[in-house]
Image (cartoon, helix red, strand yellow):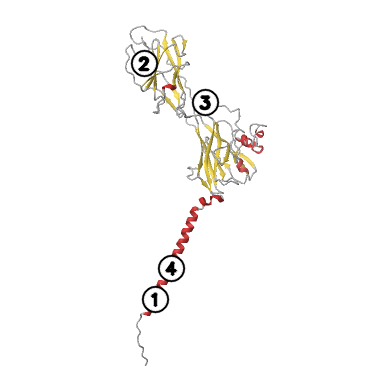
Amino acid sequence: MILCHRLFVCFLLWGGMELCYSQTTWRSETPSPRPSKAPVVVECLEAQLVVTVNKDLFGTGKLVRPADLTLGPENCEPLDQDNVVRFEVGLHKCGSSMQVTDDALVYSTFLLHKPHPERNLSILRTNLAKIPIKCHYPRQGNVSSQAILPTWVPFKSTVFSEEKLVFSLRLMDENWVAEKRSPTFQLGDTAHLQAEVHTGSHVPLRLFVDHCVATLTPDRNTSPYHSIVDFHGCLVDGLSDASSAFKAPRPRPETLQFTVDVFHFANDSRNTVYITCHLKVTPADRVPDQLNKACSFSKSSNSWSPVEGTADICQCCHKGSCGIPGHTRSLSPLVRKWHKPATRSRRHVTEEAYVTMGPLIFLGQAGDQSMGSSVSSVTSVMLGLGLVTGVTLTLATVVLALARRQRTASHSPMYPVSAS
């Protein structure tokens, strides 16, 4: 008697959750045609395990390579068949394990999809997926020529997942409604920056800007550089003659907005600036502290104030050492800028990221007059030509009028005048 059932397969992709079809069926010795809609179909035979994998495993239209699929701890290789990949192994093969329960014999293994870069490329377009597989054989049942009814509770598969958060840093318009269309600025303008994280189905999170640095190139470790945010959330650019500050309150916990007065690097002819920020998240219900804060400096009160939390979390901004006593000062300025605490925990979620925005183009430098004043120069030239043309036409009209009058006077008839 042959026992066959479909496995309930559940795995989580980078962008969201895809559920495979879950069915349990029993069939006789004569195989019947099966629909191939499920990405993975498992058949538990008397002494053999048959696993059929649809090459469109993730349901995205991108076919997986058979070489990236293995079965069990011993990495058994599959049989490639057209649009499916098929494994046919013994129940005790490929490193499978057996467990004896009161009701059944349980054989356990797993299907592993481990993608490898193609050719000389260093990128991947699919991610790792580990799918547990179990075959349950009842220890008690009615032996007959009919199908055996299952006597156990359907098992649940374990989900192995890794979620990915999407961080972004955007240049916004003055009203914070839409992105700014042009990256150009004049000296004296204010740049409106919005940092955000897209959490998807994740638990509520609060975003923080840990560090921000401005450089002339996209490489954040180059010189010269200018610190905008430092010491785990202190907007140090506001200490100078600028009015840079975080916007309070936040529009959402996962969004943080701040303004920066535009600038350019002295003694450098380049007019492009890149801003790289180290963004990180914490659970939304966690109280802000010295390592997770957003503090702005107020010149009127000569003090630091947080976007949320108590004022004492910003006191370390005065000293320039927040959260790591006696350690931050020992680092060089550039290394300290990108130092990450060793106590941060990384589990299933990438909790931080570096995001670079740019280039921002500043038109206030002397070397940029060709860009900043090109429109005004053309306008001035056109206006001058218009004035010259107008004066020329006016003079021509006057000359023609005088010439016509003189011609009329020279041809007028002479009449005699008599006096009495």
Q: CA distance from mark 1 to mark 3?
A: 97 Å
Asked whether, in this view, residue 260 is left or right of residue 382, the answer is right
> Tag 1: residue type?
Arg
Q: Name the residue located 49 percent from the left edge and 58 percent from the top edge.
A: 380
* Secondary structure of residue under mark 2: loop
Confirm or deny contact between disc 4 and disc 2 (CB under 8 A).
Answer: no
* Residue 25 badge: 2
Q: N-terminal of the two: label 3 or label 4?
A: 3
Side of 19 relative to 317 (left or right): left
Q: Amino acid at mark 4?
A: Thr
Which element is circle 1 on?
Answer: helix
Note whether 127 is above or below 393 in the view shown: above
Quadrant of the image for the C terminus? bottom left
**Where is residue 64, by image quadrant?**
top left
**Marks 2 and 1, how far apart at CA:** 113 Å
Residue 120, image x and y in percent? 47, 29
Camera-nearest label, 2 or 1: 1
In this rendering, which labeled residue sits more in front, label 4 or label 2?
Answer: 4
Q: Position of residue 223 (x, y in %)?
A: 60, 40
For mark 3, does the 10 Å Cα neighbourhood hold few (<14), some (14 to 19), or many (20 or more) residues?
Answer: few
What residue sits right under mark 3 in the picture?
348
Mark earlier in primary sequence (1, 3): 3
Look at mark 1 in the image and give the residue it sits on: 405
